[in-house]
Image (spheres, rainbow, N blue to C red):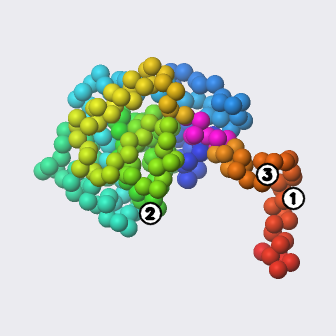
Amino acid sequence: MRSIAGINCYEMGRALQYVRVQNSSSALSSLFNSTDSIEYYSSPVVLSQSSTQHTKTQLLLINFQRETDPTGIRSRIWEVFCDRATRSNFIKCINKSQGVDISVLPTIYTRNRQHPFWLSPRGNGLDCHRTWEALYLDVIPIVWNSSLNSLYVNLPIIVINDYSEITEKFLLTKLREIVFQKRNKWPIHRYEKLKFGYWRRLILSKSRHAIRTINRENQCWRAKRTRNGHGY
C-alpha cells in the first residue's frame, strides 16, 4: 500500500487500509497534493469520542509478544497489568502469538480498534510498528519517553516515563483532552506525518538535492562507483 508510512511490515498496509475504509465516516483530502497521500482516513474524533461516552469501556489494550524485548519491560508490564489476580477492569490483555497471518489481520485490527488506547512499549528495537498502526486506525498509542520523542510531536501520542503512571483516571483525562482538541479542530495534530511524502520532503530539504534538480537515479549509480574506483 503506497500510502502507509511508518509501518515496517508492508504486508500490514492492505489490512490497515481495509479497516480504515470500512470505518471511515469521511475521506480527507490529500495534503500538499501529494501523490502518496492516504486516500482514506477515519475521522479522528469518531472512535475517541464514542469511547468517552462509554466510561465502562476497557480503555487500554495490551497486546504484544513478551519475548521480543531485550530489556524485559514487556514481561514486567504483563505481570503487573495482566495477572488475573490484579487485572484492572479498564485494561484488556490479549496475548499475541508469533508471526503474522495476513488473512486475519483485518479481524484483529477491527477487534483491537475497540479500545481507544494501545500500550506500545519497545520491542526488538526502540521503535514499534504498533505505535504507527494505532495512529492509522485512530487509536491513541502510549509510548515511553525516549530519543524518538521528536517523531511524536504534533501527533496524538501519550508519552510516559513509567508504567506506574497508567491509571483509569489518567487515561480518561488524556482521552478527554485529545477528543476536545480534535472536536474543536485545534491545529495541533499533523496527520501528514503519517505519509511518505512528508518525510521525503523533510529529508530532501536538508540534503544537497534540495538546491537543484538532478537525476537521482544517475546520482545513486555514480555513488556506487566511487569506492576505490570499483562497484560495491
Say whether residue 48 is visible: no
Q: For the residues carrying marks 1 and 3, which lies nearer the camera in this image?
A: 3
Q: What residue is disc 3 on?
A: 209
* Marked residue nearer the N-terminal end (1 or 3): 3
- Element type at marker 2? loop
CA gap between label 2 and label 1 equals 36 Å
Residue 230 lies, in percent from the top left, at 84, 78
Q: Amino acid at mark 2?
A: Asn
Q: What residue is disc 1 on?
A: 218
Say whether residue 139 is visible: yes
Residue at 44 percent across and 63 percent down: it is: 124
Q: Amino acid at mark 1?
A: Asn
Residue 119 lies, in percent from the top left, at 35, 47
Residue 114 lies, in percent from the top left, at 36, 33
Q: What residue is disc 2 on?
A: 124
Where are the magenta residues, as a range?
191-198
Extreme residue in the left direction: 85
